Every structure is written in C-alpha cells, then in structure tokens.
Amino acid sequence: MAKVNTGAALLSLCLLLACSAGGTTAADVDVEGTVRTEVENAIKSNPGVGAALIRLVFHDCWVNGCDGSVLLDQTPSGSNTEKKAINNIGLDGFSLVDTIKSKLGNSVSCADIVVFAGRDAARYLSGGKIAYSVPSGRKDGIVSSAAAADAILPQSTFEFQQLKDNFAKKNFTQEELVILSGAHSIGVSHLSSFQDRLNDTTATPINDSYKQALVADIEAQKNSQNTQDPIEKNNIRDMSLKFQNDSGYDTTGVNTAAKGALDNSYYHANLQNRVLFKSDWVMRTDIKAGGDMAEYMNNATKWNNDFAATMVKLSKLPAEGSTHYEIRKNCRVTNQNQGF
C-alpha cells in the first residue's frame, strides 16, 4: 500500500476550501472585472460618482502615496482622518468602494480598489477614449490625518508657483499639472471652494457675464439644496443652455451634448475664463501652461493619451508614512481597530 503524503493532502484540501486567513482569494474572483462592473453600474445609477472616483485617486495617492488612507474613519491614532480635511470637502464614492470590497474579499487591498475604480470611471466617462492599465499589489496604510491632507493637497486658492512647487514635490511636471487639471471637465464644487473668485475679481479676474450667471444660479441652488454652501458643476459645458448663453460661452469645438464626459472641454472653458477655481485661472498667467492648455484644447486625442499616462504615474506613487501596512478587512477602519 502506497504511503500517503499527509502534508501534501492537507495543503491541497486547504487550497480547495480557501482556508487562508482572508477567506476569498484574488484567484477566486475576477478582480478587475468585478470592479469594472460595479463602477459602470454605479455610474449608470448615479452619474456623479464617476467624477468622485477619479478625484478619490488623486486625494488618496497625493497624501502618503496610494495606500487607501483617504478611506479611513478610524485609525490607532484616532478619528481625525483625511476625510475631515478642509481640502477633502465633498469627497465621495466611499459606499461604492465598500460594496466592491464586500465582493472581492480580504485578499484585495482597499488601495487597489481606489485605483482600479478611478481607472474604470475614467474609461467609462470618456467613452473608452481614456484607457490604461495599472498594476496591483498595493497595501493599505494605518495612518490618516486631516492635518496632513490639508498641508499636502493643493488648494483651490493657490497661486501658479504654489501649484508648480506642490507638484514638483511629487516629481510631477508643470505639464502634468495642466494635464490632471483637465479632470475638472467633470464633477462639482462647493461654493466655499471658489467664493474668493466672486469676492475679489481684481486678483483673479473672472468673466463678468459668467460671474453674473453664476451668482444668480448660486442663489437658486442655495434654496433648492437648502444650504449656504451649495455645489455647482465644474464645467460650464454641463450647465443649461440659458446659463451658457447668459455667460457668453463659445461652444465652438465643444460637444455640448456630452454632459458629464471626461474630455478636453475644460481647456475651452479655462481659456475663455469661465472656470470656478482660482487654481485653474492662474494657469492662464503662465506662458508655457497657457500654451499647453491651447494645445490640449485643439487636440483631444493628445490630452486623452497624456491624461491616461499621468494617471498611471499617479497610481504608482509609493505608500509612505506608515510603519505597518496591511490588507484591510473593512476599508473604513484599520484591522487593529476591528479587533483583528
């Protein structure tokens, strides 16, 4: 009678039953297919979540690298996490990340989910014109600080040199600053993030027709949203035809039917001085940045390709700042805070 290799038999049984500590393994599910399906379904149900997912990649990776720290509600150090930073006002997409995590199990990090979801949102919102691959294997950090996020993230009130310096610290170029700013073709902004543009039109001149249309719409939105800090669409392309006409918006070269599309229409709006943020307007004051914007306004394919490449670079920013990394079982709290 042949001798049974009990060790090998037990190992085979363990693999068969997925008896690893995490339960479901990455091999058990189609990770990227699952993320893509969930993202597409979510955007179909709520178009605004697509822009939120792309923004989430930047706000996670820019602070301590791509480590999922922006998702945390609780860390071993407390609950004053990145989510509570002033610079992170309006961040969204957290519930969708939770849903994706529940389907993928404990072998896929929350940091990977953020990057994959942002990638798939960009592909969907661009009609497949922005498509790129990113590696997996990120781990989740255990450090998340509102103060750090406010200190590190670029602010909407920054001058151009401050923006350049901020990007240079991450080894990103001035052109990459212009490229990533193109994501403001989608999404929304709180009034508090661009109030300065309305208050002081001498420091950062805003087109007067656009300003007047914006002020009128803000008052209407305060009532309909029942808040003194309402949100407005980032892109004038996504506003009503009346708003565009009142603003004197030149739609030449812009597909105004493509509401919510991730495309080069941001550069059309910025070069007409019809954008919300000071940090967008100030790029007009630099000859090189202004030239880059004009190039992307006139060459949509080039911007699509360059945006994809810059998002890959962003998604590869290495995690830093934590002494320990893990794969969280719940994206909102570290494993230590879950009692593991």
Image (tube, rainbow, N blue to C red):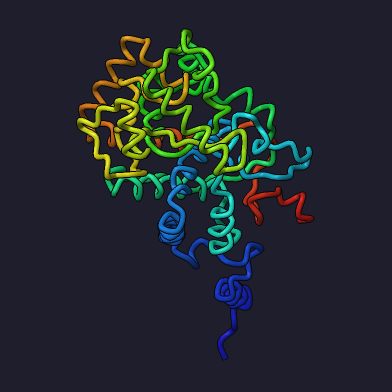
Residue 287, placed above or below residue 172: above
Residue 261, placed above or below residue 302: below
Toward the bottom, the furthest residue is 1
User: Is residue 176 among what the camera can see?
Assistant: no
Q: Decide which of 276, 76 is in the foreground and name it.
A: 276
Q: Which image quarter holds the C terminus?
A: bottom right
Residue 232, placed above or below residue 284: below
| Rendered residue at 45%/58% (across/down) | 45
Q: Which image quarter holds the N terminus?
A: bottom right
| Rendered residue at 39%/18% (across/down) | 208
User: Is residue 256 among what the camera can see?
Assistant: yes
Q: Position of residue 43 (x, y in %)?
A: 43, 54
Q: Position of residue 326 (x, y in %)?
A: 64, 48
| Rendered residue at 42%/61% (across/down) | 37
- Position of 247 with respect to 105 (left or right) is left
| Rendered residue at 28%/32% (across/down) | 303
Q: Decide which of 104, 21 is in the foreground and name it.
A: 104
Q: Position of residue 170 (x, y in %)?
A: 50, 23
- Position of 79 with respect to 124 (left or right) is right
- Position of 70 with respect to 156 (left or right) is right
Q: Decide which of 3, 237 is in the foreground and name it.
A: 237
Q: Position of residue 108 (x, y in %)?
A: 55, 55
